[in-house]
Image: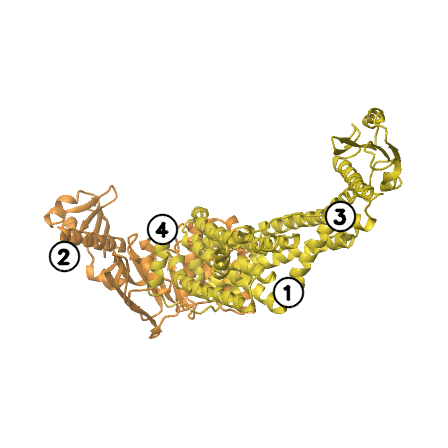
Amino acid sequence: MSVTGWQKIFKFTFTQQIKQKSFIISTTLISVLIAAMVVLINILPGLISSGDEQGGGTATSFSFTKMYLVDTSDITDNTYYSELFGDIEYIGSGDASQIAGYTDTVRNGTKCMLITITENDGTYKILGMRPADNSVSIDEANAAANTVSAAFSAGRLAKLGLQPDTIATATAPVTIGQVIAGEEEQTESMFFLNMIVPMVTSMILFIMIISYGQIIAQSIALEKTSKVIELLLTSTKPLAVIIGKVSAIGLLSILQFLIFIAVGGISFAVTLPFGMGFGALAQAGNADMAQVNDAINAVFGNISPLSIVLIIVIFLAGFLFYALLAGLVGASVSRSEDLNSAMQPFAIISVLGLYLAYFPSFMVEMDTDFLQTLSYYLPLSSPFALPSAILTNKLDMAQTLICVAVLIIVTALFAVFVAKVYHRIIVHTGSRLTIKQIFGMAKETSPKI
Amino acid sequence: MSLTVNNISKKYGDFTALRGLSFELKEPGVYALLGTNGAGKSTAIRIILGMLAKDSGEVLYNGAELDPIKEKVGYLAEERGLYPKCKIVDQLTYFAELRGMKKTEITKAVDYWFDRMELNDYRDKRANQLSKGNQQKVQLAAALIADPQLLILDEPLSGLDPVNSDIFKSIINEQIAKNKYIIMSCHQMPVIEEFCSDITILHHGEAVLQGDLNEIKKSYGRVNLAVKCDGDILPIAAECGLEPTEITPELVRFKIKEEEQAKQLLKKAAAADMTIVRYELREPSLHEIFVEHITRADNAAKEARL
C-alpha cells in the first residue's frame, strides 16, 4: 500500500483550500468574534469585580453620599455605626418617630439610604431603604445592610461583655456545603478542573473534527462525483489521495486554530492595560478570581513536555481517526446531494464520542467511574477525554500511555481498513453504499494499485 | 513494445460484467473497444488502468504486469471531470506534477498544450467558467501532458462541435504518428473506421467479434450494392435474384450473396439500355457489422433461453 505522491496531493489540496473564499471568510469572521470575546472577557471581570467590591462593604466603596440610620434596639448608641461608612455623611438616631420622616426623605431623594434596626418580641430586624429613583442599587443596599448587620451582631456580643478578639472569633464567616460521604467538596478550582478543562479541550477537537471532517468528506465526494478521481488514480494510489487530503486539511485546521489562538492572545495582551485579567483580579484580592487563577496555574503549571507531546499525539491521532471516517463517508456517495445524509452517522458517532468524554466530568455527583474509564480507552471518545485527563492528572503515566497506545493502534488498524476499501468505494457508482457493503469490500481482493 | 490483455474477467455478485476478454496491441496504433451501453467497456478499461480488481486474467505491458502509474498511462475518461472552482492552469500543472514531471518540463508542456488546444485565453479561468468542449480539451491535455506511450481514450469525441472535433482528430493522428499505443472506446463508428486498425466488439461482457478491421470487412466481402439509374432497376434485379433492402429517390440498395450477382445486374441494365448514374459495390460498414453481431448475439441468447 504505497502512498507515493501524497505530498503533491497535500500541496495542491492545501493551496486550493487556503485560497477558498469560505476559508478566508470563516477565518476572518471567527477571528473578529474571538477578538471581540476576548476583549469583553478581559474587561468584564474588571467591571464585575468593581461591583463586587462595592458590595463587599468597604467603607469607601458605596456610591451613595448620605446614610440615615435609626437604631431603636438599645443595643448600641447612635455613633456606633458612623465609622462603617467612612466619608459618607452619616445621620444616626435612636428615635423611632424619625423613621417616617427619613423614609420620605430617602424615597424622594437621591444617592442616599436609610437603615432601620428594630426589635419586636425579642427578634431584631435590619431594613435597608433606598431612593425611588434607583440611584442606589439593590445589591448596594443589601451590602450596606449586611455591613450594619455584622456590626450590630458584634455590638450585641460586646453588650454581653465579650472581648473584641472573642467577638472576632464568634463572628467569623461560616460557609456551608454538602458532599457525598468520602468525596471532596467541589471548590471553584475543582469546578474549573472537572468541568471547564474537559469542556474546552474536548470542544476544540470536536469543532475541528466536525467542521474539517465535513470539508474532507466534501472534497473527496467532489473528486468522486466530478470524476476527477479517475484521472488522479492513473497517477497515484488511492491511499495517497486520502492521506494527502486528510493531512492537508488537518494542517489547515491546525493553522486556523493557531490563528484563532494568536488573535485571542494578541487581543488579550492589547486590552490588558484597559481591563483586569484573572491574575490581576486575583492580585487585587478578588477571592473567586484567585481560585480560578489558582486552578489555571494548577492545570498549566503542571504540564510536562511529555504531557504536551502526548496531547499533540492524541489530537493528531484523534483527528486522523475521524478524518479517515469522514473520508470514507465522502467516498461512499456517488452524488453530491447524498453527502449530507451520508454524514449523519459521522456526526452522531462524533457527538457520542464527545458526550461520553464530557458526560462523566459533568455528572460529578453520579457514579460514572466506569463511563469515565471507558471514555479514556474507547477511541471514539478518548481523543476528547484524554487531553483533559492529562491536564488534570486524573490518569497516571502508565494508564495514559496505555490509552494513547490503544488510540494509535486502533487508528492505524482503521487506516489499514480504509486503505483496503477506499480504492473500491471511490470507483463505485450507483446507489449509496451501506456499512455492510463497505465491510464486505474489505474481504475482497485488491487491485494492484 | 506490446500490451496484452489476457482473459480478464469481472463479476459483481451474480452479474458478470466481463468474461474472459483477451486482445493484444502488438504494434503502435489505435485499438477499438466497442460495445453497447453496459457491454463491459468501462469495466475493461478500469481493470487495465488498475482501478478495478479483476477476478482473473492479466494485463501485460512488454511482458510484465502493467503498472499504469509507472507507465504514466494517459487516460481520458468517458465522464469528464475537473475541479470546478480551480484555475485551468493550476489543474494542468497539478496533473503534470502527479505524473512526476519536473518544473521546467511542466511549464513547457502546459504552454504547449494551451497553444495546441487553443486554450490560451482560458489559462486563468476556473473550470466551471469553460464550455463543455473546452473542458474536454483540458482533459485531453491532462491525459497527454506527460507524453505517455500508452493512451486510453473513452469516448474522446462525444459532445464536441465540428471545429473541436477536428482538433481532437488531428491530435489523435499526431499521437498515432508518434507510434503511441492507443485504446479507444467510441460509439461513433466512422471515427473508429478512421483511426482503428483492430477492434473488439463487446456484448454483455463477452467479445462477440475481434480482429483486424480490414480483415473483418474483407471476410464479409463486398456485399453492399447501391445502384442509381434512369429506368426501373427492380425487375432486372429480381431476375438476378436480388431483393432491395432500401429504396430511396436517390438509389436502391441490395444485399448480394456473391459479386457475380452484381456483375449480372450491371450487364442486364446495360443491355436494357439504362443509363447507370451510380454503381457502388462495397464492404459492409462497421456500423452494419456491429449491429449484425449484436443482433446475432441477442438472438442466440433468446434461443438459448427458450
First reached walking from the N terminus: tag 1 or tag 4: 1
Q: Mark 4 packing: few (<14 Cα in 10 Å), some, or many (20+)?
A: few
Residue B146 is situated, as x and y percent measured from the top left of the image, at: 47, 66
Indicate the quadrant where residue A120 lies.
Answer: top right
Q: Say what amino acid the circle numbered 4 marks.
A: Gly
Label 1 to label 4, Cα distance in Å?
A: 51 Å
Q: What's the chain of the residue with tag 4?
A: A
Eye-nearest disc, 4 or 3 = 3
- Same chain letter for marks 1 and 4: yes
In the figure, the yellow chain has which letter? A
Q: Which residue has dot 3 on it?
A: A170
- The circle drawn on residue A430 is 4
Q: In the rendered view, does B24 fall on the left or right side of A158?
A: left
Q: Mark 3 packing: few (<14 Cα in 10 Å), some, or many (20+)?
A: some
Q: Say what amino acid the circle numbered 1 marks.
A: Ile
Q: Is residue B52 visible?
A: no
First reached walking from the N terminus: tag 1 or tag 3: 3
Label 4 to label 3, Cα distance in Å?
A: 82 Å
Q: What's the chain of the residue with tag 3?
A: A
In the figure, the orange chain has which letter? B
Q: What's the chain of the residue with tag 2?
A: B
Residue that appears at 51% across and 49% down: B128
Q: Residue furthest bottom?
A: B63
